[in-house]
Image (spheres, rainbow, N blue to C red):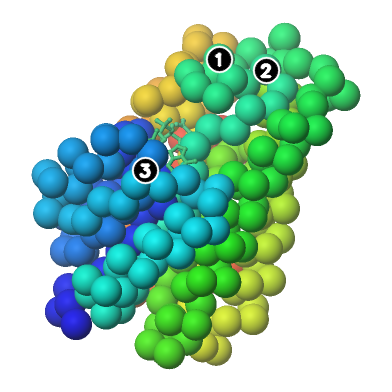
Amino acid sequence: MSDKRVAVIAACGKGLGEAIARALHAHGHSLVMMGRSEGVEDLAKELDGIAVRGDVGETADLQSLIDTAMKAHGRIDAVMNNTGHVRGGNTAATAPVYDPETGGDLLEVSDEDWMGGLNYILLNVVRMARIVTPIMEKQGSGAILNMSSFAHREPAPAFPVGACLRMALGGFTKMYADKYARAGIRMNCILPGFIENYPMSDEIRRRVPLGRSGKLEEVGETANFLLTDAAGYITGQSILVDGGMNRGV
Ligand SMILES: NC(=O)c1ccc[n+]([C@@H]2O[C@H](COP(=O)([O-])OP(=O)(O)OC[C@H]3O[C@@H](n4cnc5c(N)ncnc54)[C@H](OP(=O)(O)O)[C@@H]3O)[C@@H](O)[C@H]2O)c1
């Protein structure tokens, strides 16, 4: 059994997953992380963690990630359900450009893109919960954090698939949190705004009260907080890290 806290990170190697891995490592976690390419192996080597190659949309790969963590450490304290960018609207799978003016026609989003969103935003979380909940129930403790986005709170025309499915993710998170709170398991969502690894235009900057992109470390530190006992009384919540962009109160 590990005497350090053990954190599992799905979708890791660069971007927000990497930032969260660095924060969890700095705060004393042993890491077990998954990615599809060698980036995850390089990061694991640097952070003294374990890398597993796999896809968060595949149940067998999620199972192998959890099996690897249990075999190495005998417990799992924290699960970060990170994922990739999904297609749909005018967002491409990689380096999408946000443009509300040309944000794609809602009815032209294909069934394939809607199903991709379901698989990589909601079902990845549901499947991970099926796998890891019995382990955390036995431990009597555990924290799960789901990667979401500012569009979870306020539909953004350029991100129809991400916005709709992340709203569904918020619903699942609340229901899961209700059901497993008494078992000592917490689940929350983190909702980044525009972070520095994503293109930022002057038009978007004007909408952000803090007037800048978020730093990767700011997402990493918030995720670490939500995954540790400092946030022990927070569950079922969707927490924005968006520089004040959302207008809700
Ligand atoms: N960056 C932002 O400003 C921002 C804002 C709001 C929400 N988000 C959300 O945060 C998530 C991460 O965004 P990011 O900007 O960090 O993306 P990114 O820079 O493209 O990094 C994604 C990471 O996840 C891994 N990955 C992607 N798809 C995967 C899959 N199917 N299975 C396993 N690993 C996978 C990638 O590694 P491999 O390629 O090796 O698999 C990569 O290391 C996305 O869901 C995005 O929508 C981002």
Compared with 90, 233 (above or below) is below
Q: Which mark is in front, 3 or 1? A: 3
| Residue at horizontal 72 percent and vertical 10 percent from the top | 101
Q: Say which element carries label 3.
A: strand
Q: Nearer the viewer, residue 101 or 95?
A: 95
Q: CA distance from mark 1 to mark 2?
A: 8 Å
Dot 2: few (<14), some (14–19), or many (≥20) neighbours within 10 Å?
A: many
Q: Which mark is residue 90?
A: 2
Percent position of residue 233, x then y: 46, 76
Image point (39%, 67%), residue name: 66
Disc nearer the start of the sequence (1/2)? 2
Which residue is painted at 30% across and 78% down in the image?
75
Residue holding disc 3: 35
Q: What residue type is disc 3 on?
A: Gly
Question: Badge 3, how many Cα within 10 Å: few under 14, some, many 20+?
Answer: many
Of residues 122 and 152, the one nearer the viewer is: 122
Image location (x, y in percent) of residue 85:
53, 33
The answer to whether the residue bearing label 3 lies less than 8 angstroms from the nearest atom of ligand 1 is yes
Residue type of the residue flagged with mark 1: Val
